[in-house]
Image: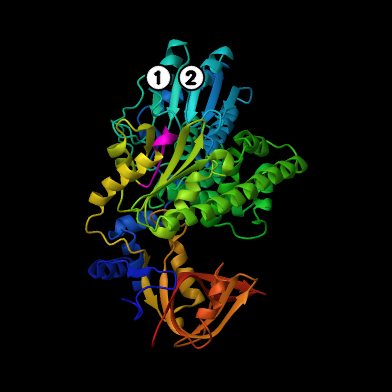
Amino acid sequence: MVTDTGLSVTNYRWQKTPVDRVAVTALSKKLGLSPLLAHLLVARGFSEAEEVDKFLKASLASIPEPRLMLNMEKVADLLRKALHEGRSIRIVGDYDCDGTTGLITLKQAFQIVNPQARVSYYVPDREKEGYGLNPKIVEQAKRDGVEYLISVDIGITAHKEWEMACQLGITGICIDHHTVLGSMAPQSAVVLCPKQAGCNYPEKELAACGISLQLARMLLAEHPRRDEIIRSLCKLVAIGTVSDMVTLRSCANRAIVKAGLAGLNSGSPNKGLSALIEVSGLRDRKITAYDLGFKLGPRINAAGRMGGSTLQVIELLNADSMEQARQLASQIDWLNMRRQQAQQRLVDELLVMVEMRGRRDLVLVHGGKHDSGWHQGIVGIAAAKLVERYGRPALVCSIRNGLAYGSARSIKSFDILRALEAVSDGLLLRFGGHSAAAGFMLDAARIDELRTRINEYARVAFEGTDLTLVRNYDLELTPADITVGLIKEISCLEPHGIDNPRPTFVVRGRLVEARQVGGKHLKMKLVGRGPALDAIWWHHGELVEKVRPNAVVALMGKLEINEWNGYLRPQLNVDDLQLLKRL
């Protein structure tokens, strides 16, 4: 235990991530790494020198050849022939960031292969059509004379739709990365999915946009500028990869995001992307993986969530002038602002509902009318906020026309997809997803029944489990340990994301300064051995009364370099705080 007071001021228990000390020492000696860096690598599951070397040196050149993916050569041959013969091709992408960036990646690659290519695209309307490929899309494709129908980030369960396309004489190509319990890949389409049975491609965790990038590599294999083009495409694919929350322990995903960030930080010739960077407040500053997931990605997603259209994003990225690009980027930014406001109102309402039930549920299940603010495009985000706040799985439903469209988010110890499968019989009209996140649909009148069933399941699953909220950290440091050099040293672990989180440290000391800044943030200065350490706790200014100067505290957070007037200083970006009786 790090502290002597139990829970933190936010009611979390702190827990140090266990590591094998023998592995740390061996890795440090073998690769000449500092013990601290070796510790962080082992904590992220890397103990073999070869693994570490691949991880740290991940590059586009190290991604396995796309031809190794099941059906890749077949798809590439089909599309090369179709493009050169001027056949009509339609790409249907999901309305989220992964689907959108995958669609654009393919569209651009096709136009490079043949600038006169007959390529159209379509994105389902979230509210009117819901998720996935549907019969109307296939029927419209036939009416429009489409000969090749390609799905991106959807389609892996659309057996009926692909069979319909086949019967109508349309060649179907499904690019997806999802798996659904008990499902087989469609037989009426050619499927690119590393997770499908029979596919031995070593990189299983690519997002759909990453698989699209691999197809682009294959199609452009003979192009004299292939490597340059692929690096350029990575700018968008990196955004889709991080936003879709796929693992960044994967060397392929890591390489894509590294290449994408390098391209974004060197400036993009794409006017739409430049305008999007501008409205996101990222102009003239270093763009990080955090910015991909929390600034650029949400704006791309907002178009499909808040009554706009994902087609606006495609139009933005096709903009011919900066004036047009800025206008479109401004519209998308406004939709994102609406999304943030609606999200906050819904989360506030949900918090009241949870407290009214007395937190007695192991799984939080709530629903409300779409027209009353429970917008289908934000229930998943709201569910994630409940998980973050209460440390329990959450299911939030948007009700329209008697149906409840739900999103579920979960914690590591509770596989939400298996839970939904266990309670689905005669209750859920459809469901799918993975262990941490899922979507589902049921009759709205049966939400209470869903709450009862899934909590009965959870009581067995959680038996003997301590559900106290926990924050994990890597190491405890003193203020004297924290230098600009140390922060630069651990930066080799970037880009951070799922399964490769930013290192989290605990630092004890005495506060010589604690004040509110910007009206809502808490600025602190901590002293122990060595120079004082600056710390900032965003959006927690109201806690200033609890941490008066001279209080003895332990701070948990991430290290960063604060640059001001050309001077570099270490700073702790605080996640939590515990009050101590003594150092």
Q: Is residue 393 left or right of residue 212?
A: left
Which residue lies at the image location 58% right of the left edge and 57% below the top edge? 287
Magenta stretch: dominant SS? strand
Q: Position of residue 140 (x, y in %)?
A: 56, 17
Answer few, some or many: residues within 10 Å of disc 1's Cα (few below 14, many 20 plus, some between 14 and 19): some
Tell me: residue 282, above or below residue 168: below
Pick the residue in front: 294 or 69. 294
Tell me: residue 427, above or below residue 360: above
> Can I make out residue 261 in this image?
no
How far apart, in angstroms, are the residues tagged by discs 2 and 1? Answer: 8 Å
Q: Position of residue 195 (x, y in %)?
A: 33, 36
> Can I make out residue 239 in this image?
yes
- Which quadrant, please, contains the C terminus? bottom left
| Residue 545 included in the magenta stretch of the image | no
Which residue lies at the image location 54% right of the left edge and 49% below the top edge? 260
Q: Over which residues does the magenta segment extend?
A: 436-446
- Which quadrant, please, contains the N terminus? bottom left
Please state which amino acid type lies under the numbered disc 1. Lys
| Residue 444 included in the magenta stretch of the image | yes
Considering only order in the chain, which callout, 1 or 2, is on the residue closer to the N terminus?
2
Dot 2 and dot 1 residues touching (CB under 8 Å): yes
Answer few, some or many: residues within 10 Å of disc 2's Cα (few below 14, many 20 plus, some between 14 and 19): some
Please state which amino acid type lies under the numbered disc 2. Pro
On residue 135, the disc is 2
Residue corresponding to mark 1: 160
Pick the residue in front: 227 or 317. 317
**Quadrant hosting residue 84:** top right
On residue 571, the disc is none
Under circle 1, the secondary element is: helix
Which residue lies at the image location 46% right of the left edge and 36% below the top edge? 405
Under circle 2, the secondary element is: helix
